[in-house]
Amino acid sequence: MKTLDKMEANLLLDEIGLKIGSWNQIQTKDQSHIGDWINVQAPRAYLLECAQHCAGWLPKGRWKIFQIDNSTGWIDPVQASLFFGLLYGENYEYNLTDRTFLFNFSASGVQNEKTELLISNLIYVFLLFYSHGHVVSSGSASAQFLGIQDGYIYFCGGDTLLAEELVKQLTKNVVVEPPQWVLDIFCARQDEIYKSP
C-alpha cells in the first residue's frame, strides 16, 4: 500500500473514466453524467459480512484505490487509530491529510487475498463510524466505484443487476453469511494449517 497525491491518483483513475473531485471524492470525469447507481443501508447486525460482500462487488484488477473524501475529518482519535492501525500495523505514524491509498496486486495469490481482506476491513471501519469514502478497481467497468457514506453503501456504475441482487440479500431480515470469496480464503488457510507438520 502507498499513498498517492491527487495528480497520481487521477492518472490511474483516468483509465476507467473517473477522477478525484474538489471534495476529494471519486466522481465521473464528466460530472453531468453520474450513471446508474443503487444504494443500501448497511445492516448493523452484519456489518462485517456486508463490507465483505460490498468489497467483492468490485472486480479484481492490477490495483484498487481507497479514497477518503473531506467529509471524514478524523476528529476522534480512536476511529483514526483503528483505520490507520489496519493500514500500517501497531507502530504506525500517520498523516491525517493522507486521503488516497493505492493497493497494488501481484502474482502472489496469498498476498492478494490479504489485500482484499484488508480493503473489506477498511470498508467495515467506514461503515462502523459513518465515514465517507470510495473504493475503485482498475478492473472496474467505466465509471464503476463503491461509495460509503453515513452507513450506506452506494454501488455506482458497473453491474447494476449484481448490485440489485446484493441489495436484496442485505435487506432481508435473515443472517448475512460471508461471501464465497471470503469462505474460499478461510478454507484454503484451514487446509494449510492442517497440512502443516
Image (spheres, helix red, strand yellow):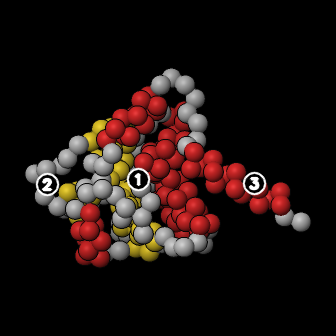
Residue under label 3, please give it: 190
Between 9 and 17, the one lying in front of the other is 17
Q: Amino acid at mark 2?
A: Gln
Secondary structure beneath label 1: loop
Q: In the image as oriented, which residue stretches furthest toward the right?
A: 197
Examine the image and state in which quarter residue 92 appears. Answer: bottom right
- Please give the residue where the numbered disc 1 appears in the rendered image: 58
The residue drawn where x is 51% and y is 73% is 106
Image position of 189 (left or right of 140): right
Q: CA distance from mark 2 to mark 3?
A: 46 Å
Q: Residue at x 53, y 53 (%)?
A: 121
Camera sees residue 126: no
Q: Is the residue marked by circle 2 packed among few (<14), some (14-19), or many (20+) residues within 10 Å?
A: few
Q: For the residue marked with disc 1, what is the amino acid?
A: Leu
Residue 20 position, x and y percent, is 24, 64
Q: Which mark is residue 31?
A: 2
Quadrant the C terminus occupies = bottom right
Which numbered disc, 2 or 3, marks the residue that appears first in the sequence? 2
Precedes in sequence: disc 1 or disc 3: 1
Question: Disc 1 versus disc 3: distance between alpha carbons?
Answer: 26 Å
Q: Nearer the viewer, mark 1 or mark 2?
A: 1
Residue 108 rendering spot, x and y as whole percentages:
58, 72
